[in-house]
């Protein structure tokens, strides 16, 4: 491209020619940034078992999270509902059910996992499946039981049940499993939207959340939450295999003195199910 411009230099005014040359590094840097996205890497901010035990104070900036992935899920500061990341935008569903795009660049989150999403497998399923049947189908598509998978489901749902936790205000914060009676549920019939989630292996429990974990966002971007139950109708399943992950841990007194020796596996399962 540069040689071609040099040959045609006398066809451009001097200032225009210099403007093109100055623009070349910017274009090259943008292309390099795009090429350097690792579509097989999972980034996690915070530690899941810490969130389960009450580490709800945000520490990782949402703007920084966007540089680590354009797809994912997490929890907001002070546990005010649920977070979802889709197409590089972050959405929050509060305890009230209000759902909106997060524009507050000063907001920090206590836990999230994200990746740059690029589907390796795509299938279209036009049949009703309850959650158990749906997960059995996903199992058949994810042969490596110790593999990490990011999963995007787009389409229509016969039924959806989601939940969100209320915010906390006074320390010491209660453990998440102890707040199950305070969660609020939302039910939707014949709705359409996106499920954003992962299936992670058992060896990632405690740092992350093993098994299936999905959050929902309606097409109108006005409803969402953590998936508790569902019946599919007409969906497209996109799967991306991941092969590495990193964890960014907080640096604050609450984290530094947190007891990670306690086994919180059952608490994690209870919170995922939305009941004990």
Image (spheres, rainbow, N blue to C red):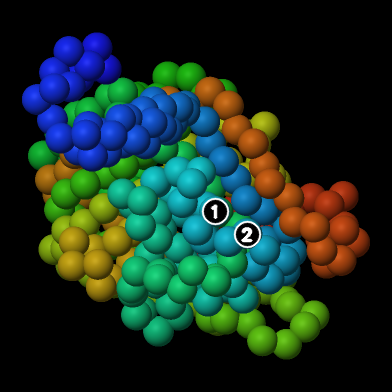
Quarter of the picture holding the C terminus: bottom right
Q: Quarter of the image containing the N terminus?
A: top left
User: Is 182 positioned to the left or the right of 206 in the image?
Assistant: left
Q: Secondary structure at mark 1?
A: helix
Q: Is residue 53 left or right of residue 129?
A: right
Quick one: 199 or 180, which is closer to the camera?
A: 199
Q: Position of residue 24 (x, y in %)?
A: 32, 30
Residue 221 visible in the displayed image: yes
Question: Residue at (29%, 56%) from the top-left corner?
Answer: 230
Closest to the camera, between mark 2 and mark 1, is 1
Picture coordinates of residue 185, whole percent (x, y): 40, 75
Q: Which mark is residue 60?
A: 2
Question: Measuring 62% from the left and 76% from the top, which residue is drawn there?
Answer: 78
Q: Given the current orientation, which residue lies at the most extreme right position?
A: 257
From the viewer's perspective, is residue 117 above or below residue 213? above
Corner quadrant of residue 141: top left
Mark 1 and mark 2 in contact (Cβ < 8 Å)?
A: yes
3D distance between C-alphas at marks 2 and 1: 7 Å
């Amino acid at each position: 491209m540069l040689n071609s411009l040099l040959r045609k230099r006398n066809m451009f005014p001097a200032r225009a020619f210099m403007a093109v040359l100055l623009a070349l590094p910017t274009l090259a840097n943008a292309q390099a940034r795009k090429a350097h996205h690792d579509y097989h890497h999972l980034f996690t901010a915070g530690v899941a078992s810490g969130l389960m035990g009450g580490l709800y104070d945000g520490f990782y900036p949402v703007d920084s999270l966007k540089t680590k992935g354009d797809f994912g899920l997490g929890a907001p500061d002070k546990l005010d509902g649920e977070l979802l990341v889709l197409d590089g935008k972050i959405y929050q569903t509060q305890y009230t059910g209000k759902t909106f795009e997060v524009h507050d660049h000063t907001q920090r989150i206590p836990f999230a996992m994200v990746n740059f999403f690029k589907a390796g497998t795509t299938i279209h399923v036009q049949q009703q499946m309850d959650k158990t049947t749906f997960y059995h189908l996903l199992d058949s598509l994810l042969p490596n039981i110790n593999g990490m998978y990011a999963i995007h489901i787009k389409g229509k749902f016969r039924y959806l049940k989601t939940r969100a936790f209320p915010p906390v205000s006074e320390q010491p914060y209660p453990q998440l499993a102890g707040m199950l009676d305070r969660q609020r549920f939302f039910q939707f019939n014949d709705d359409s939207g996106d499920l954003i989630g992962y299936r992670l292996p058992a060896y990632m429990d405690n740092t992350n959340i093993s098994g299936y974990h999905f959050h929902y966002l309606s097409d109108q971007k006005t409803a969402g939450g953590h998936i508790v139950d569902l019946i599919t109708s007409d969906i497209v399943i996109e799967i991306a295999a991941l092969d590495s992950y990193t964890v960014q841990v907080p640096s604050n007194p609450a984290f530094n003195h947190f007891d990670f020796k306690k086994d919180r596996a059952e608490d994690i399962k209870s919170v995922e199910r939305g009941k004990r």
